[in-house]
């Protein structure tokens, strides 16, 4: 799956920018990745629930909310109740990640847990039994257009192993620095869903960029087989 991140889109033309990746099947976004930042958990400020509510009305593409915010225990539920398909919180910010996952699921959303590049996976394996999505950050969260940190692929491989052996049931998503040069190695490591901001929205034709990314990932994905 390819999840274009609107962080790199033109915020004054969001509906048009979404429509650009909402076309024919091969070029269509699977999820639309929406980065919510609060200027506390990360040193950047983007958008919040009112904008997400409007985006939900503007598209049928499942919305994937990535909450880079403090106190997700309080705020995440609103995004699920609004109708986001997947709501991801950061384990570094969550006080009770299991309770968050239960609340998100009860509200009808998939529950996602994200780990920053320096955060290990192993302490959270039990917590992840309550989640649907693991979002592995491959840049420090906060900004688009940063360089891919390949070291995080060890965590992707470990997650894939836990899934393949039946210990976890998760979509493995990666976020940060994904482009035509990096997507294959991520696919080989076991990623299911690729967030791409600048690689899609800085391209002349975002829909073709989605198609090109999918074409690069697919052989590696098929090779690993899941
Ligand atoms: C960064 C965000 C990403 C960002 C990725 O903190 O979580 O979703 O949009 O941008 P690129 O793909 O340009 O690295
Ligand atoms: Zn993101």
Image (spheres, helix red, strand yellow):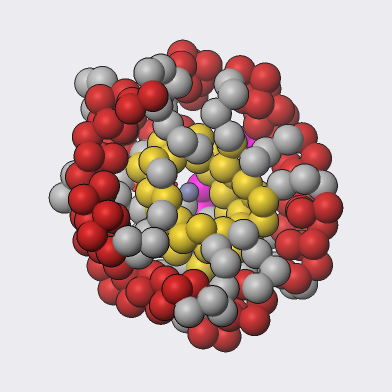
Question: Residue 5 appears in which quarter of the rendering?
Answer: top left
Q: Look at the image and tell me whether residue 181 can be seen.
A: yes
Q: Which residues are magenta?
A: 43-48
Residue 146 seen from this side: no
Q: Identify whether 177 is placed above or below 35.
A: below
Question: The C terminus lies in which quarter of the figure?
Answer: bottom left
**Eyeballing the image, is 205 above or below 115?**
above
Residue ID at (51%, 58%): 171
The question of residue 84 being in magenta is answered with: no
> What number of labels is visible?
0
Closer-to-camera residue (133/149): 133
Residue found farthest to the left? 181
Q: Is residue 125 left or right of residue 29?
A: right
Q: Position of residue 91 (x, y in %)?
A: 61, 69
Q: Quadrant of residue 180?
A: top left
* Residue pictured at 52% horizontal, 16% vertical: 15
Residue 198 as seen in the image, left or right of residue 59 = left
Identify the residue at the far bottom of this view.
123
- Left or right: residue 124 versus residue 72 is left
Q: Where residue 35 sits in the image (x, y, percent)?
A: 53, 43
Residue 157: x %, y % from top left: 36, 74
Q: Main secondary structure of the magenta part?
A: loop
Judging depth in this view, the residue of 130 and 68 nearest the camera is 130
**Is 47 inside the magenta-drawn segment?**
yes
For the N terminus, the quadrant is top left
Identify the residue at horizontal 29%, vertical 55% (top origin). Answer: 221
Q: Which residue appears at 57% of the width and 49% of the height?
A: 66
Judge left or right: residue 158 versus residue 66: left
């Amino acid at each position: 799956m390819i999840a274009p991140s609107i962080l790199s889109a033109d915020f004054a033309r969001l509906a048009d920018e979404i429509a650009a990746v909402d076309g024919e099947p091969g070029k269509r976004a699977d999820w639309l990745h929406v980065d919510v930042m609060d200027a506390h958990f990360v040193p950047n400020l983007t958008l919040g629930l009112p904008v997400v509510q409007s985006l939900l009305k503007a598209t049928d593409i499942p919305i994937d909310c990535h909450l880079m915010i403090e106190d997700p225990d309080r705020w995440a539920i609103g995004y699920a109740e609004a109708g986001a398909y997947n709501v991801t919180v950061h384990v570094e910010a969550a006080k009770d990640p299991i309770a968050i996952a239960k609340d998100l699921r009860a509200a009808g959303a998939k529950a996602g847990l994200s780990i920053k590049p320096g955060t290990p996976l192993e302490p959270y394996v039990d917590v992840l039994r309550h989640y649907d999505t693991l979002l592995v950050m491959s840049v420090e969260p906060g900004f688009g257009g940063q360089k891919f940190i390949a070291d995080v692929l060890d965590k992707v491989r470990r997650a894939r192993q836990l899934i393949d052996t039946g210990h976890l049931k998760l979509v493995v998503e990666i976020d940060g620095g994904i482009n035509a040069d990096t997507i294959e190695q991520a696919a080989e490591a076991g990623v299911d869903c690729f967030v791409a901001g600048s690689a899609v929205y800085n391209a002349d034709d975002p829909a073709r960029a989605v198609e090109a990314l999918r074409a690069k990932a697919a052989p590696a994905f098929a090779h690993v087989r899941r």
